[in-house]
Image (spheres, grey):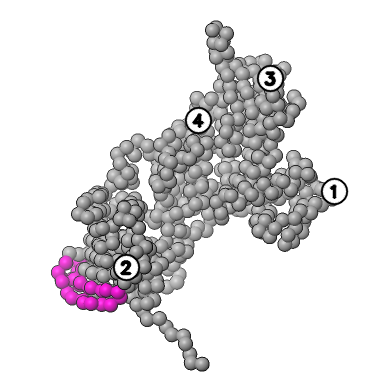
Amino acid sequence: MPDIIQLLPDHVANQIAAGEVVQRPSSVVKELMENAIDAEATIIKLIVREAGKTLIQVIDNGKGMSQTDARLSFERHATSKIKKAEDLFNLHTKGFRGEALASIAAIAHVELRTRQESQQLGSCLKIEGSTLISQENISTPTGTSVAVKNLFYNIPARRNFLKSNTIETRHIVNEFQRVALAHPNIAFSFYHNENEVYNLSTGNLRQRIVAILGKKTNEKLVPIHEITDLVEIKGFVTKPEFAKRKRDEQFFFVNDRFIKNAYLNHAVSSAFENLLSGGHYPTYFLYLTVPTNSIDINIHPTKTEIKFDDEKTLYAILRSAVKHSLGQYNVGPILDFDRDATLDTPYNLKDKNLPNPRVTVNHDFNPFKPEEQKSIQFPYHREKNREWESLYNGLDSANIDFKSETADSEFFSEEKSNSKTYQVHKKYIVSSIKSGIVYINQQLAHQRILYEEFLGNITVKDAMSQQLLFPLELSFNTTDITLIKEIKDELESIGFLFGEISNDTIMVMGMPVNIIESQINGIIENLLEDIKNDIPNTSFSQVDIMAKSLSKSLAIKTGTKLDLKEQEDIVNKLFLCKQPDSSPFGKRTFVTVNIDEIDKKFNN
Ligand code: ADP
Ligand code: MG
């Protein structure tokens, strides 16, 4: 048999590579603009015709290229940005693969004009489908202009695959916005079919955001600034009342590079938890600066995904930074930035030796702060005008006994009572308070209590476990077994104990104290279902979902009769929660009825 393997000719290899780099006109926009930024340009102009299908041109005033470099820049893996493999872990440029120009030139007609400041004449190169058509000396301004015409002219399948001009233009605008938002210190302009779309002068971040998204944005922005050993976070979120139904204004930049990251997005969203009504998403512009050696940009050809060394800690810091800012600007319900930051971290971090996030806190901010440090900070010390705060604003002696072993006597003491709670319709716990009456939904309140307990156990300490007299063997399919193995640690930290785990069975040796044996199977099944329905591969969300799922499974249900002790237990524990007023799923846990309202009913 003759040998049959041969090396692909360059232009074929380039076309294949182009498939990865250039998905649509906006990919070209991104690559060319990034090259201009890497060339240290301060003014960048983008010219587009027919949604980029006939022309995409980027003109910059950067450092330009020598004649030889101009020719070399179209070779595959030709780059001036890295020299050796280690450089990959210390990237300061947008590009580094040396693939973009080669790929683009393989599937379009390209004209490059470039001149370095030190040179009299510049170069002009024309390349079509990887073939050099001409190279000549020309006079041209310092900097570089790359014009890309007739994209995909030689790959009709790709050309036909392009969407309508409206859609392709939208992609280009998005790409332009991302680059422009990342670099407020560079002036950008953008023309489409001779019309000026943007003309952005240099300025600060806020000015750039407002210039791109409109004047009205200004009043909506809440600034964020946090510096820790691991990361510096700058930028803005918008106030919750301006949340949008679309997610199109969510921007993360890492070391000035736009990235997408579901996990970090979750961190921000969770900081907004309970501040947004269903179907609304926070808008944010967040700029993270991390040491270049702590990220890996290499995992995606178009580089919108990044791997972080320590994602979990980053998550915790980001979430607390956003919460902190929302609190400081008085838009969050609970100002909890005095709390131990690890309590905010719903992951299994307990075994990790974390650098303590250095969160700068304005301690003077808390108007209720007592002289001496209290062991527990109650959220309701922090902010006025909370509905549930009225519960405490004058508890009289005949009212609820909020005292508990950890409660702060200043708020609960003397006021204790022979107070009674009542259960109504096996659904609500009712009690009188000074301002009127409180109705607590037993099921939702208990969900909240359990949710916070589970999160606490998973993140901070190991929970109590009860050994089973006879280990329980449960059967699952292989997918579920794999999932159980993944969350085994977390399950053990809340009190489960597992023996052997085979391909289709698990042995349960112990379980949390508040579970009864007959429930175990159902609880684990619900849990697996809930995790499967969540965003994949986000370990935070697994822990959060676990706590939610377990609290839902285990909470006392509507229809359960509660004795007095159980009722009081719920009342006490609920108001020791960080967020007593809502269930883990955002539903109200209690309502109050003011005595005036009751009076009114009698006056009619
Ligand atoms: P990469 O950006 O990954 O290095 P590219 O194919 O995008 O690969 O560019 C190849 C090289 O061409 C760059 O490394 C750079 O040296 C040079 N180059 C490209 N565009 C410009 C520009 N606008 N100004 C100056 N040099 C450029
Ligand atoms: Mg590049």
Residue 416 — which label? Answer: 3
Give the residue type at disc 2.
Phe
4 or 1: tag closer to the N-terminus = 4
1 or 3: tag closer to the N-terminus = 3
Specify the farthest residue to the bottom. 1
Residue position marked by numbered label 4 in the rendering = 366
Mark closer to the observer (2, 1): 2
Residue 469 — which label? Answer: 1
Task: Report how far apart the C-alphas of labels 4 and 1 lie in the structure.
Answer: 51 Å
3 or 2: tag closer to the N-terminus = 2
Q: Is mark 4 within 8 Å of ligand 2?
A: no
- Marks 1 & 3, CB-CB < 8 Å contact: no
Mark closer to the observer (3, 2): 2
Give the residue type at disc 1.
Leu
Mark closer to the observer (3, 4): 3
The front one of 175 and 25 is 25
Q: Residues within 10 Å of mark 4 (few under 14, many from 20)?
A: some
Residue position marked by numbered label 2 in the rendering = 152
Residue 127 lies in what quarter of the image?
bottom left
Task: Report how far apart the C-alphas of labels 3 and 4 lie in the structure.
Answer: 26 Å
- Residue range (magenta): 115-140
> How far across and down, in percent of the image, does residue 360 sit?
47, 41
